[in-house]
Amino acid sequence: MRGHNYRSLYMHELSIALRAVETIVEDLADHSGSVLSVQIRVGALSGVVPDSLRFAWDVACADTRLSGSVLEIEEVPVRIWCEACQCEHTLPDADFVFRCPRCAASVTEVMAGRELEILSVELTEHESPQAH
Amino acid sequence: MNPPKLIEIRKNILKKNDELAQGLRTRFATHGVFVANFVSSPGTGKTELLKYTMARLTERFAVAAIVGDVETENDAIRLRKSGAPAYQVETHNMCHLESFHIEKAIAAASSQFRVEELDLLIVENVGNLVCTSAFDLGEDLQVVLVSTTEGEDKPLKYPKIFDRSDVCILTKMDLAEALEFDHAQMRASIDAVKPGMPVFEVSAKTGLGMDAWIDYLAGRVEEKQAVETPAWVS
Ligand SMILES: Nc1nc2c(ncn2[C@@H]2O[C@H](COP(=O)(O)OP(=O)(O)O)[C@@H](O)[C@H]2O)c(=O)[nH]1
Ligand SMILES: [Mg+2]
Ligand SMILES: [Zn+2]
């Protein structure tokens, strides 16, 4: 990403990471064990930079049951639908020009790329509280 | 040790923000309050545009503003010169507003304005084109501003915020000639990232182009007031 400073980038993805951790902790209230990994889906249009999210992850997980968990990000490219050609196109990474690559018509229908979703977590259940 | 097990979550990361924003949206709808969120880089001219806009609309509508800034209360002080109330949100170094900021601000600003009595609530977001793009605030309209000084390719560099915004305002049009600003190229950049996006070219210094913008916003506010409170709103 261009044109913004380190601090603002950091703050933004940290907020997102903190929200994710919060949601997961709530969802796992009925499960015991510690979290090994978290699977997340991030669309190219979501406003979240995957590397920054990875960078913020450890900080966001500190002092929670997600501490030490690995963040696995599935990146989703932007897919658009051209009404004129009746076909779907995947836009090249970091080049979001909403125009059909085949007929050059302007396209407003975005089929995918705005996702920001927690898919699943991988949990280890210990036999006993002391087990490591 | 048992083998690890996979637990499905399938939830939007910003679920809490979005739920709170949806709650705010319902509340605004109940009281017929139109909410507009203004985003841009620092220095593009949000405060200047909004001071002008609020001064023009304050005779016709009950208007108030919430301003997010990482540093000072300057913007709220400048906005109050319009004659309408403005409440400064302390973001505590956060580079964007989230829906909880809006909810808190509405409660904290009750000595200055009561949100139920408003026709138009203006939100000046923190100056940032990256971080503001992910957070729904319960607004009806998101306006992205770009100035003539920022280069005609600016929209191409920040497609995400354009994707999320409804309207674009080009500011500092009084400087266009001196800067050899290329209107056609800027329009093409905007159209590439958000086809069909309405664009207003204005100057807060000279008032150039402001009538069209003010008419548009006033029309949107009246449109919302004309809508009956939906039956599902309790
Ligand atoms: N020439 C000119 N300068 C402007 C205009 N609008 C804002 N400015 C100036 O640009 C600077 C930043 O404006 P401000 O409203 O504080 O930007 P914000 O950070 O987006 O809120 C200030 O010095 C303003 O006086 C305009 O229409 N024309
Ligand atoms: Mg400002
Ligand atoms: Zn096509």
Image (tube, rainbow, N blue to C red):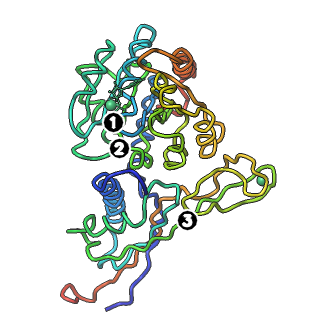
Residue B98: give its label.
2
Tag 1: amino acid: Ile
Residue hosting label 3: A76
Residues under labels 2 and 3: Cα distance? 24 Å
Q: Chain of mark 2?
A: B
Tag 3: amino acid: Val
Q: Residues within 10 Å of mark 3 (few under 14, many from 20)?
A: some
Above or below residue A96? Residue B185 is above
Figure quadrant of residue B31 = top left
Residue hosting label 1: B102
Q: Position of residue A89 (x, y in %)?
A: 70, 61
Q: Are marks 1 and 2 on the same chain?
A: yes
Residues under labels 3 and 1: Cα distance? 30 Å
Q: Residues within 10 Å of mark 1 (few under 14, many from 20)?
A: many
Badge 2 marks a residue whose secondary structure is loop
Badge 3 marks a residue whose secondary structure is strand
Figure quadrant of residue B61 = top left
Q: Does the numbered disc 1 mark a residue whose Cβ is under 8 Å from ligand 2? A: no
Q: Chain of mark 3?
A: A
Above or below residue B210? Residue A31 is below
Badge 1 marks a residue whose secondary structure is helix
